[in-house]
């Protein structure tokens, strides 16, 4: 089996009396493409933010690439070669798409190489026609693609995406799904996602969160057919 590249041990995050993440033990191996799902308020985003360094967990530990990263801020985690797309938009609205991608590529590449990287990304993401548009003026679907572009511009080995298909049309979600599968050829990927069609078509492995704990973990077909998983979704999301 491939090496473990992300691990949590008894990871917990409380907000006052709310236990959002409750002693989660988790392992991710190199080359995996994992989807994290669960009903609203299950703790997915909180868990994700503990991995990315947006939250300092109240208990337990996180290891990424063999290094203990518990409490490291997000820019330090990113510098370890981790690409992050948060649920909250991160683009500079007043700058064109090309510039947004370039600034991210520059974190890893010299200026000339960053130029080349931006051209590669525009092609890979199908964004050539939008290269000179201001990020603040993009349609939602295009914007999501640019957000992913910014997350991968520094050639991460680990990609963490919170709701990349959120608010997309069926066709747009399918394109993001194809992109994520293709990125998985060269990166280990974790995706937090609500859209079940997306999860079914993309995931190799699905982890279901419920009340801050892992309710189920396994191959998509088995997990989505699990009676306990269907129950927590009350038939509303698992179809
Ligand atoms: N910054 C915060 N302050 C206080 N409580 C929070 C905070 N963030 C999350 N929570 C609470 O923690 C619990 C888990 O929330 P979280 O956002 O992680 O769920 P989620 O699974 O991502 O839900 P969704 O599907 O709606 O995005 C919820 O009860 C939420 O209200
Ligand atoms: Mg969330």
Image: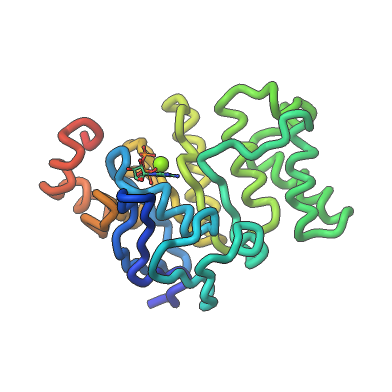
Please state the horizontal and vertical placement of residue 161, each as a whole percent of the image.
50, 48
Give residue 17's position: percent from left, percent from top.
Answer: 31, 50
**Split into 4 quadrants, where in the image is the C terminus?**
top left
Residue 65, position as x, y percentages in the image:
53, 73
What residue sits 42% from the left and 27% below the top? 170
- The quarter of the rendering in which ligand 1 is drawn is top left
Residue at 41% across / 62% down in the picture?
A: 58
Report the residue that reaches farthest toward the front: 16
- Quadrant housing the N terminus: bottom left
Colour convention: rainbow
Position of 39 with respect to 13 (left or right) is left
Q: State whether residue 215 is above or below residue 230.
A: below
Q: Position of residue 22 (x, y in %)?
A: 29, 59
Q: How many marks?
A: 0
Q: Quadrant of residue 47?
A: bottom left
Q: Of all residues shown, which one is farthest toward the right? A: 112
> Is residue 96 shown above or below 14?
above
Q: Is residue 111 left or right of residue 169?
A: right
Vertical comparison of 37 with 132: above or below: below
**Front one among 60 and 195:** 60
Q: What residue is shown at x 75% (from left), y 40% (from top)?
A: 100
Q: Nearer the viewer, residue 79 or 152?
A: 79
Residue at x 56%, y 46% (from the top left corner): 85
């Amino acid at each position: 089996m491939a090496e473990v590249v992300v691990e949590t041990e008894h990871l917990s995050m409380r907000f006052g009396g709310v236990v959002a993440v409750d002693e989660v033990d988790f392992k991710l191996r190199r080359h995996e493409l994992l989807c994290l799902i669960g009903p609203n308020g299950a703790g997915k985003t909180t868990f994700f933010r503990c991995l990315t360094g947006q939250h300092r967990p109240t208990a337990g530990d996180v290891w990424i690439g063999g290094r203990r990263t518990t409490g490291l801020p997000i820019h330090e985690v990113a510098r370890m070669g981790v690409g992050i797309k948060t649920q909250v938009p991160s683009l500079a609205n007043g700058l064109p798409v090309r510039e947004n991608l370039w600034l991210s590529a520059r974190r890893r590449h010299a200026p000339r190489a960053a130029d080349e990287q931006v051209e590669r990304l525009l092609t890979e993401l199908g964004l050539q026609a939008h290269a000179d548009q201001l990020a603040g003026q993009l349609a939602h679907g295009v914007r999501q693609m640019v957000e992913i572009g910014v997350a991968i511009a520094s050639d991460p080995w680990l990609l963490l995406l919170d709701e990349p298909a959120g608010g997309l049309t069926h066709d747009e979600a399918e394109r993001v799904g194809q992109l994520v599968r293709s990125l998985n050829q060269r990166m280990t990927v974790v995706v937090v996602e609500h859209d079940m069609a997306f999860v079914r078509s993309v995931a190799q492995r699905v982890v279901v969160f419920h009340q801050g704990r892992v309710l189920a973990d396994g191959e998509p077909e088995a997990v989505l057919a699990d009676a306990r998983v269907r129950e927590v979704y009350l038939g509303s999301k698992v179809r």
